[in-house]
Amino acid sequence: MDHEREKKLVPNEIKEDKKINLRPTKIEEFIGQTNIKSNLKTFIESSVRRKKNLDHIILYGPPGLGKTTLANIISYEKNVNIHSTSGPAFTKKGDLVTLLSNLSNGDILFIDEIHRLSPIVEESLYPAMEDFKCDYIIGAGPSARVMQISIEKFTLIGATTRLGLLSRPLRDRFGIPLQLEFYQPNDLKDIICLNSEKLKIKIDESASYEIAKRSRGTPRIAIRLLKRIIDFSVVQNAQTIDIQVVLTSLKQMGIDSEGLDEMDRKYLNCISKNYSGGPVGIETLSAALLEQRDIIEDVIEPYLMQRGLVQRTSRGRIITKKGLFHLK
Ligand code: ADP
């Protein structure tokens, strides 16, 4: 299914996001998530004072909330190197061994989508995380021998959309679990203002607040909407982005007052009309909407649930009164 067409507000990273680096590098520039920031400051300072490495960290929460950004900030604040990779990038055990043996003392290894590591690679992470050792296979076939090699002490930072996707043994090996929450409109407004400054674009207070309210609590979406609205304003020859430009652009993009796009409304309509409001199972919804289960669970549902438009029960999904009211 053509995703970009159907679902405008997918918070997964796309090429365009990488074009201009809008990522904050210092902890002070990271807006919102006050609890996480203050905890991290404490852990970083304690590790500096004790001259110890940071414990392994797992960052979890929906896509686009700042997990990768935080991992990079931690490396900046600790003044150590960061090696970034992702779960699906490891095709064999050897890939991990090569990476681990190249780390220097204190380095950070960042593994995005860590829940997608293959079981074999995941198992070889255990001794590395615990004892800073890993198995190395010499030779092949019957004459192959396993040697254990020591590696430098490193900090693993894992990122995942849902902590429940991680196997228990892996989850237990992270000393610091940090859950990122959806952002409040005021924080998103600050992120939008900061980004428009970096992009050298003038934007009104009310205009940035309106974008913030419609960004599904997600910085990546806020930034992407801002960029699209800039496109509309350029074509309209607007010198400043004001509330009128924002409202017409959002309407044009099919984004409603709650920040929902066509796909979200299709999802709500499907439960409401095809299944009399639910409960309806995720597999059924996935088939009815021609959409992958992962996308529904990681991208569409978290925000709809947070807004109280839909409920997840043991018997399936149910549309709430608020959800029904929104469709009207
Ligand atoms: P994730 O890894 O959780 O998918 P990212 O770290 O890639 O999310 O963040 C997505 C985008 O949002 C990045 O461009 C980043 O600059 C921006 N961003 C995320 N969180 C913040 C924040 N707290 N303050 C400022 N910008 C942020």
Image (cartoon, grey):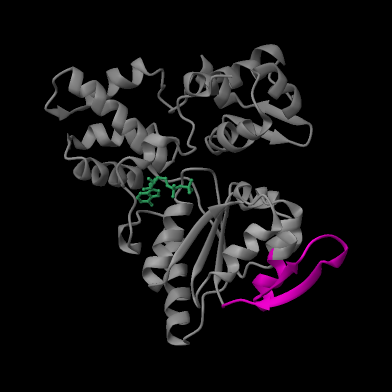
Residue range (magenta): 125-152
Q: Nearer the viewer, residue 93 or 286?
A: 93
In this view, which residue lies farthest toward the bottom?
50
Which quadrant of the view contains residue 280?
top right
Residue 101, horizontal then vertical, whole percent:
59, 70
Residue beneath the point at 34% across and 22% down: 250
Residue drawn at point x = 51 percent, y = 43 percent: 63
The magenta stretch spans residue 179: no
Q: Is residue 153 visible?
A: yes
Report the side of 267 relative to 262 (left or right): right
Please state the total of marks drawn on the protein image.
Answer: 0
**Point 59% across, 21% down: residue:** 268
Q: In this image, 80 relative to 305: left or right?
A: left
Q: Quadrant of residue 124?
A: bottom right
* The residue positioned farthest toward the right in the image shown: 142
Q: Is residue 172 visible?
A: no
Q: Quadrant of the N terminus?
A: top right
Q: As rendered, which of 184 and 86 lies closer to the eye?
A: 86
Q: Can you say whether 295 is above or below 101 in the image?
A: above
Q: Residue at x 42, y 54 (%)?
A: 69
Q: In the figure, is residue 45 to the left or right of 19?
A: right
71 w.r.t. 243: above or below: below
**Residue 139 highlighted magenta (yes or no):** yes
Residue 98 x %, y %: 60, 64
How far across and down, in percent of the image, does residue 56 sit?
58, 69
- The picture places residue 284, in percent across and down from the top left corner, at 75, 22
